[in-house]
Amino acid sequence: MATVKGVNQTLIDAGGIAALTEGLVNGRVKVNLDHYVLTTGNNGDTIKLFGLLPAGAKVVAIMLSATVAQSGMSIGVGDLDSATRYSASNAGLQTAIVPVWILGTEYVIGTTDTSTTDTDRQVTVTLSTTATAATLYAALFWTTD
């Protein structure tokens, strides 16, 4: 068995810790929680979650779950600038209560895509089809340092 290193560990071992984006090593992770009551009227809707994040925030991960299975539904997770920034078509929420994890792709709000305005600070979930009545629970993990 070999011992291998992750990308950041390789940079740290080579003395290049300064090359890492602040907050991706030794960062203090914050969490925003939100929920939304889905109804059968939510057909292809976009749901705003979590409130505005500060410029420079790094999205680490987003967790979603629903109290009732959303069979046949895929979800896009993004923001008001790009509805699929974090996930284009995640087939999650197919099983009740099982969390779906979406990685933050190291996107830095307000600096990674300099063509956007402050509207890119609002995380959104876009439903692909009609929802089944349930509660959608969401957690956003992010850091600024």
Image (cartoon, helix red, strand yellow):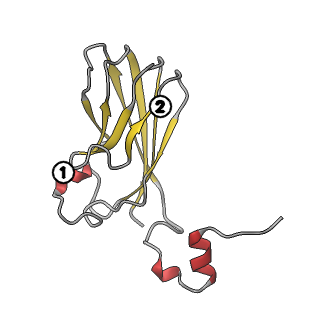
Q: Quadrant of the N terminus?
A: bottom right
Q: Using the rendered view, name the quadrant where residue 58 is placed.
A: bottom left
Residue under the image location 48 percent in, 82 percent down = 18
Q: Earlier in the sequence, mark 2 or mark 1?
A: 2
Dividing the picture into quarters, in which one does residue 60 lie? bottom left
Residue 40 placement (x, y as % from top left): 30, 13
Residue in view at x 47 percent, y 27 percent = 93
Left/right placement of residue 33 relative to residue 50 reads right
Residue type for callout 1: Thr
The circle on residue 92 is 2
Q: Does residue 95 appear left or right of residue 125 in this picture? A: right
Q: Which residue is mark 1?
A: 119
**Mark 2 residue crowding within 10 angstroms, few (<14) / some (14–19) / many (20+):** many
Residue at image point 29% right, 59% down: 109
Left/right placement of residue 83 relative to residue 65 reads left
Residue 91 in the image: above or below residue 86 = above
How far from the left and from the top, in percent, is residue 86? 38, 48
Q: In this rendering, is residue 121 above or below 97?
A: below
For the C terminus, the image quarter is bottom left
